Image (spheres, helix red, strand yellow):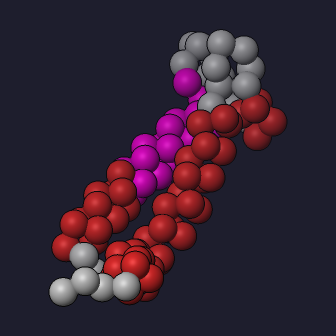
């Protein structure tokens, strides 16, 4: 049975715009922006932007400040959620929701 090209295209597009996929896509965009911001706030070789929020205030022994440790944890959690969101999207695309 030959289908009209627009009907074939519609069969491909409709599964790509279901509400779970759209929801996870929006979450992924927000997480990507937050993750990029948290990486940029880290202290690099120089002072970094984390100095603006007290990240440059190291302990007397030259250790890592509490602000930097907190930023590390936030970055790790955001990365974990980002990876899980990508895996969730892959699963949804695979099962065709």
Q: Residue at x 48, y 68 (%)?
A: 25
Q: Residue at x 50, y 38 (%)?
A: 72
In the image, residue 61 above or below residue 18: above
Q: Is residue 40 visible?
A: yes
Residue span colored magenta:
64-82
In the image, residue 87 above or below residue 42: below
Q: Residue at x 56, y 47 (%)?
A: 35
Magenta residues, dominant SS class: helix
- Residue 15, position in %: x, y? 34, 80
- Residue 18, position in %: x, y? 40, 84
The residue at the far front in this view is: 2
Determine if the magenta segment contains residue 40: no
Q: Is residue 70 visible?
A: no
Closer to us: 41 or 30: 30
Q: Residue at x 54, y 70 (%)?
A: 26
In the image, residue 51 above or below residue 29: above
Image check: 80 left or right of 70?
A: left
Quarter in which the N terminus is drawn: bottom left
Closer to us: 3 or 38: 3
- Residue 9, position in %: x, y? 40, 77
Image check: 38 left or right of 21?
A: right
Quarter in which the C terminus is drawn: bottom left
Q: Quadrant of residue 89?
A: bottom left
Image check: 96 left or right of 52?
A: left
The residue at the far right in this view is: 52
Determine if the magenta segment contains residue 65: yes
């Amino acid at each position: 049975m030959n289908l009209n090209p627009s009907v074939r295209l519609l069969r491909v597009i409709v599964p790509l715009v279901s509400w779970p996929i759209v929801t996870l896509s929006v979450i992924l965009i927000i997480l990507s922006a937050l993750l990029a911001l948290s990486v940029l706030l880290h202290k690099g070789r120089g002072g970094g932007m984390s100095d603006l929020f007290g990240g440059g205030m190291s302990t007397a022994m030259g250790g890592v400040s509490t602000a930097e440790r907190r930023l590390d944890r936030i970055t790790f959690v955001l990365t974990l959620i980002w990876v899980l969101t990508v895996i969730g999207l892959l699963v949804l695309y695979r099962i065709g929701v």
